[in-house]
Image (cartoon, coloured by chain):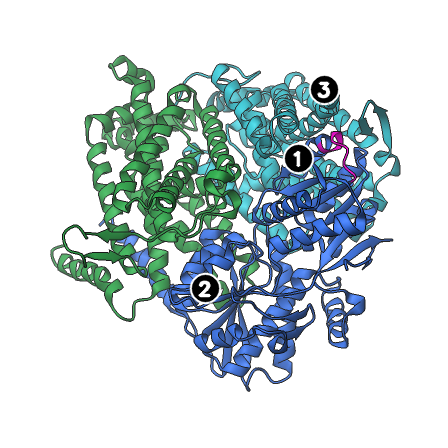
Chain colours: A green, B blue, C cyan
Amino acid sequence: MGKIKPLLAVLALGLLAYPLLPFANEYLLHVVILVMIYMVLAMGLNIVPGFCGLLDLGFVGFYGIGAYTAGLLTVHYGVSFWLIVPLAALNGALWGVLLGAPTLRLTGDYFAIVTFGFSELVVLFLTNEIWLTRGPLGLPGIDPVNVNLEFLHPDWFWEFVGEAPYFYLALFMVLAVYFVLRRVEDSRLGRAWFAIREDPLAAASCGVDILTYKVIAFAISAGIGAVGGAFFARWQLFLSPDMFKFWESFLVLCMVVLGGLGNIHGALIGAVIMVCLGEVLREALFVAGLPPEVRFLFYGLIMVLIMRFKPAGFFPAIAATARGNPLLAALAERIEKTYGERRETHS
Amino acid sequence: MKFGWCKAVLLACVVALMSVPAHAKTVKIACASAFSGPAAAYGDNVKAGVTLKVEEINAAGGVGGAQVEVLWMDSLCDPKESNTVAAKIARDEEIVGVVGHLCSSAHLAALPTYLRAGVPAITPTATNVAISDQNKDRKGLVWSFRDVYRDDFQGKFLARYAKEVLGVAKVAVFYENNDYGIGLKDAFVGEAKRLGLDVVGEEAYVKGTPDFTPQLTKLKASAPDGIFLSGYYNEGALIASQAKKIGLDVLKFGADGFDNMDYIKLAGDASEGTYITTPFLASEAGPEAQKFLADFKARYNRDVDYMSANAYDAAGILLQAIEKAGADRAKIREYLAGMNTPEKGYHGVSGLTYFDEHGDAQKPAFVKVVKNGEMVPAQQLK
Amino acid sequence: MLEQLLPQLVNGLTLGVIYALIAVGYTMVYGVIELINFAHGEVYMFGAFLCVTFITAVGMPFYLAIVAAMGCCALIGMFLDLVAYKPLRKAPRLAALITAIGMSIFLQNLAMVIWGSRPLPFVQSAVPAYLNETALSFSGVYLTWLQLFIFAVTTAMMLGLMFIITRTRIGTAMRALAQNKTAAALMGINVNFVIAFTFALGSAMGAVAGILVSVYYNSLYPTMGYVAGVKAFAAAVLGGIGSVPGAMLGGIVLGVAEALGAGYVSSLYRDGVAYAVMIAVIIFRPSGLLGKAVIDKA
């Protein structure tokens, strides 16, 4: 390790400086920024199924709420991005609480379908309330992010142009969410979530207020989704309800599971794989002389293959804590040997 | 070493994305459209038109001696995907122009990137009015053009046609809840009310669900004489046959979204008597257009639709610009912006195309009607 | 307003029965292995396309083509299980869900490559003519024979399934498996065979649904399975996932809510009304309309 570390540091610095170089590839940066947005979304979603063990199919609803909060505040009131981010996060979290409080008592797939219904209602609202969102006509003309320090000096006003500044902003966002979640994971809150996921009954009998902790998880997840949305709005500069269809929820869920459910690093790698796969295939098909129509054929196939050979994702969850204990692992092995298939006790 | 994986994958992506193969003595254009997903059928129409044009040009020696290569970019009719595709196109300096995008929302999402990088684009299908305001860069230069009607033009035209030629008094609107459907509906309803038509019902549908009977039942209760179907032929065909099933047998008319023989194929008898606007009439078109119609039929074994015809012309306009102005993005834009009078316009199969100061095509509209399973010219508006 | 009520109810019922037809296949697979088989919508779409292909390319008569398509879809279902789900039996449940989504994308695009992306009309010449004739018409309601046929097939399928599940040996095995896979295996039940059979049966029913729906709407296209699949899944959960009569009831509630929503609330919120009803029902009946209360396994 000792010799590799400086090398890695140089490599990391090189990657960090890359966007500033004159020959930087804007398309590559665009894809990387997209990856980073999905990293934030995947880390946000990961809290609910990964930490609390609830299948959430409505994550895109909060992403959409965040994006439109940002878009509308920018277009109508010209609110600064730096103020919009906390507002969007709060709005997302508020909806998370509103949806979560009555529905988090539900179990398994009933919860999944309710969240799905919610995200569809959000999209319908965005589509139909034309007076507010312009509906399917889309919301064009959103201003890019700017840094306004005019109150200090009249010339101190910078607007983001091109991909490079967004790259650093997105990187900052990913790091911030990452470190916050790492801290939370190790806190009382995180432990309570894991307890709920592993065995709700035991958790409850140890004095964990299950519903409250689930609502907190859902609200934080929703808030992070909304932050991702706010960034997305000010980066894409155009919003349309089509961007928040059900498929996006699936996509983010795939990232979380593919990477390794319940593991923050898994969410990160999942985002890289799922976004890059589409782009790499675009190029690969062209080089291989295949028509663009078959891109998603391979996309689906590769997804199936990854799950086939990495059923627990790239970073298996720490859920395996119990199995990490040598005594328990030996016991589990003996049970499995004796009784055939091990019965899944949690989803 | 937990991050080893991430880095490896990231590096693989970097390498893959950068390895764009180079070709000599070709000129590259991109066609950004939907080749998979729910809108793939429309993307297929566009692809057919562009392919035909490019093959013709290449067979005749190419543009200024260079063969034309089209890069097909699947943007799925999805705004986010479109923006990524736009970044890819903008980055590849060899791509001098774009035919696309397919959907207005996709086109609007791609525009900021095109404006920043300076990429000229001609869309054969995006009709949303908002594009006219969003296609200028900071210097006020137009980078996006379209050889297709704006929604407001067609909507108003159909309202006048309904009143003056079809003579309906009570009219209902059944629109697809997307940019195209709403844009047309708003223009139609506004003009219809101005002309004194009674708009008795407005109902919406979404793409994907094949059942429209609840809305049709509601519209039937308002007893219209005519119904304006503001959407595309795929759903339009289902609507027409379901309307017939529930006994709503009134005059139907639609915009260019219906101009596709699949409408008749899918709706069968129920399509009879549907009035459709179109940028050109096959029977009255010139010899060049007749040749196109025949070539298209021979190649794809189906009749030309407006998307294919517009795409054929969009590719034609772009290639003419490349030939006259050279393979340079800024010069091509300048040339396209200069096509601002009928004399400087492009004589394509879909009629004469020239652009106004917003990059919008000025085209006349004609009306066809479905009769005995064929689309034949109807009485035209004076 | 009121004169619309009856026709709207009929519209909703037709729609609901169609959802139910697809939902039954979902709920059966779910009942046995607790897998949300998202690729079921794609099997439904393949059923329709295969039937048309058998009629046009092979020249089979209509009913024979239905049977052939059912057989092919049963094979597709078993194949899906074999390559996609069987290797993941021991993996976390969500892994199988992601595989199902991947398979769904794969099959949808495969159909697009094979049959093209433009919608096809059903071969009307092959369909018995009486099916499209009006069977009943009263006070603004028009029912074709085909609609009655769809009602009849759905009911028959539901009853047949319930018979298989409750009265036959394999049905008993399916129920045993649903309760405890390990215990069932210890009782001498061939787990993999029973699961394969479940997939085959569910997929054959999906094929019937796809064919009837594409005849009814006279249109088939590669993305038809996705939307229908999502709605049917919602119907299956609403009715209480795993319960066959529940799927039927859930489908009908969803369909009627949609029709009445479009008729009386706003066509813009047609799906919205259906989903709102669904959410409300689930909040008040946390295990669906006819589902058994589930133990919180979270």
| Residue nearest the observer in this picture, B209 or A211 | B209
Residue A47 seen in the current view:
no
Q: Position of residue A337 (x, y in %)?
A: 38, 28
The answer to whether residue A86 is left or right of residue C256 is left
Between the C-alphas of marks 2 and 1, the distance is 36 Å
Given residues B242 and A213, the one toward you in this image is B242
* Residue identifier under label 3: C2
Tell me which chain the residue with mark 1 is part of: C
Identify which amino acid the numbered label 2 is placed on: Glu
For residue C149, above or below residue B377: above
- Same subunit, labels 3 and 2: the answer reads no
Q: Which residues are magenta?
A: B219-225
Could you say which is closer to the camera, residue C231 or residue B172? B172
User: Splitting the image into 4 quarters, where does residue A266 fall?
Assistant: top left
Residue at the spot 22% in from the left edge and 56% down from the top edge: A157
Residue under numbered circle 1: C206
Secondary structure of the residue carrying tag 2 is: helix
Instruction: Point out the residue furthest to the left here.
Output: A2
Image label count:
3
Q: Earlier in the sequence, mark 1 or mark 3?
A: 3
Q: Say if the magenta span includes residue A247.
A: no
The mark lying in front, picked from 3 and 2, is 3
**How much space separates mark 3 and mark 2, taking CA atoms?**
58 Å
Residue B357 lies, with reference to residue B371, above or below; the image says below
Category of crowding for the residue at label 2, using alpha-carbon neighbours closer than 10 angstroms: few (below 14), some (14–19), many (at least 20): many
Residue B224, magenta (yes or no): yes
Name the subunit of mark 2: A
Residue at 39 percent of width and 42 percent of height: A72
- Disc 1 versus disc 3: distance between alpha carbons? 36 Å
Q: Circle 2 sits on which residue?
A: A283
In this rendering, the label closer to the viewer, 2 or 1: 2
